[in-house]
Amino acid sequence: MLSTLAQAATRRPLTVIGLWAAFLLLGFGLGTGVFADLSDDVPDVPGTESDMADDYLSGLDPTGESVTAVVAGEPVSDATLRAQVERTVAEVRKIAGVAEVPDPYTTPGLTARDGRALVVPVTFEGGLSDEAEEEATDSAVETIKRIDAPDVHVSGGELLGRQLGERAQEDVKNAELISLPVVLALLLVVFGGLRAAALPLVIAVSGIAGAFLGLFAFSQVTDISVYAIQVTTMLGLGLAIDYALLMLVRFREERRHTESTEDLVEAVHRTVDAAGRTVLFSGLTVAVSLTGLLVFPSVFLRSMGLAVAAVVVVDMLAAVTLLPALLTKFGGRIRPSKARSQDEEGRVFARLARFAQRRRIAVLVTVVPALLLLALPVTGMRIAIGDARQLPSSTEARQLYDTVDAHFPKGTGVSPVVVVLKPGTDTATADRIRALVPNSESRELPGGNAVVELQPPGSVDGKAAADLVERVRDVRGDEPAEVTGVAARLVDFRAMLADRAPWAALTVLAGIFVLLFAFTGSVLIPLRTIATTLLSLGAALGVVVWVFQDGHGAGLLGGEGLGALSLTAPPLIVSIAFGLAMDYELFILARMRESRQRTGDDHEAVVTGLRRSGRVVTCAALLLAVVFGAFMTGGFSPILQIGLGLTLAVLIDATVVRMLLVPATMALLGRRAWWAPRPLRRVHDRFGLREGAAAEPSVTTKV
């Protein structure tokens, strides 16, 4: 397959380039439409009690979306301000599509006790078309914003998704403006020439277009989280640079043997045959790592897994089709890598490898406990839906939250636990449910149904709210009463994660094992790789918990300790970081295999593998860290958590794990590292794929 792709790219380079140009136009044209259709609703899990109860309730009591306005900054009793507010409430009530706007001066709880803030909730009619609801929302917001007060903020409902989408688009643009120049500067240092340095950015732009187009396609059939934009874009950008870097390093190595156009084309073929196989397996391992997300019934996790996998495939295809086409047209102007003697090339990495081999026991007893210590906070990890504190302080929703928090009692605006009492529910059971909290509210619905709203103490995702959900479910027993609401959805989401996580892990580990076996022909190397990768992953996740859950240094990154991680962060960090770690493992294993096949020396193969891949792995990790760091400037707490987790996972894996643990464990295993049972060996001989041999094994090169 790779040979076919390489031949197509070199025979018709302009055609291939033209097709990719059309793809870019489609991605940046049609694909960017996803920014207008983003959701901040993550924890829904189809088939759970909370989801089914919510659907049932919507059918009985169809109500529209709502937005909330807060007016603050001066005494609300001021006659001029009161007249403005009352006039505004009257005007908003007349807007087509608005169902209800209570008077904040006469409705209990809507005016702050300190007399310096009031809340104006606006509820829209149910059954409105998207266009009608958008028009009603815009009209209401425009009318409310005309109130002359120091602080007037409006958010919530459909408006919140739109505000977050606009902020996400701005953050992606800023991240690209920050990361691309820095990446270009680093690539200039690596390659020493603008032509070679610019090509990875071309592939990176393809990755961004693929991210937009993939998300837009999925947005047509399911909700796309606002956080999906940053995650898929930064991963698409980072992996594209990784793959292009590996291909270009190999091409410059092969370029030293070219004199004519025919030789140049052959160099491209050898590059695709060798490094292209590594890119192919790397892309497959990342995609397989993301299949674990498909095991979860959560729409958000599944859509994220599919979208990110699609981006990985785009990056992989761009590296093995677009880049060879560009090299065929412009590769003659790219300088070959400088030949250096084996003793000079990669000396630092060779010394690290030999040190780890000689002191393998010392390395293991030092590094492994250190990584386990970093991973220790994971044992106390908590996940939560979170509130507006997860958002940057400049967003409208965060400003509204801060204003309400400053003037109203704690817990104001917390969504209640909603209990749907279906026909046949015992009256005594219903009374016991109402008695669980003081001042519970009830209302009758058609068909003998009723709804009880229980206000939980504390935050909606705190322990008290979760305990209230469990108490309601214990009290109702076998009665036809169902619990829903934000707290119930979080309880069901956590239960879903606990139930499906073992199956997700089994799916991913089995897939990774098969791919690594196909790549190496060994059963021990995949096991060793999985174990060391889990160490680096645990260490990275432990630091994220320590920073963003426990609050140690979160302010330095523009966040704050929230007492829990965003429920989106842990599954995404684990699945994506696991796939990224496989990238660097494959980069190293590819060179190890070449050396071992050529010399038969297991000990020296490890040294040569690190000598020849250490620079690539280090540069790739640094470039990826730059990309992730740029996306962390947006200030969204879930993105800060995911960005920090992925950055640490990549850096720890590319340095401590791959440069120390890999040679130490390979030395400990010795020749047994490449062992496989005879039946599996025959399977690999027939179906396994291998790296191409180096063009000139006696001479090494500089990246």
Image: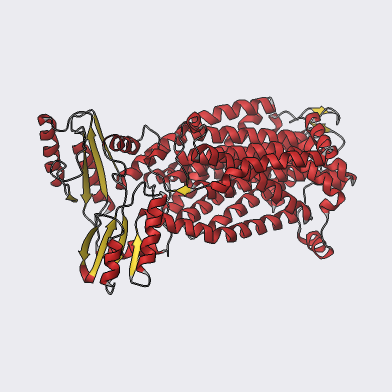
Total marks in image: 0
Locate residue 101 relative to residue 660 in the image: left or right.
left
Locate residue 154 relative to residue 360 in the image: left or right.
left
Q: Quadrant of residue 363?
A: top right
Q: In what quadrant of the picture does the C terminus appear?
A: top right
Locate residue 578 relative to residue 415 in the image: left or right.
right
Residue 266 position (above or below residue 306): above
Specify whether residue 326 is in view: no
Q: Quadrant of residue 608?
A: top right
Q: In what quadrant of the picture does the N terminus appear?
A: bottom right
Residue 553 image point, x, y percent: 52, 31
Residue 184 image point, x, y percent: 59, 28
Residue 317 position (above or below residue 244): below
Residue 150 position (above or below residue 669): above
- Residue shown at 40% from the left, 56% from the top: 467
Residue 451 image point, x, y percent: 26, 62
Specify whether residue 660 is in view: yes
Q: Nearer the viewer, residue 593 or 328?
A: 593
Locate residue 468 relative to residue 285 in the image: left or right.
left
Residue 296 image point, x, y percent: 51, 59
Residue 437 position (above or below residue 657): below
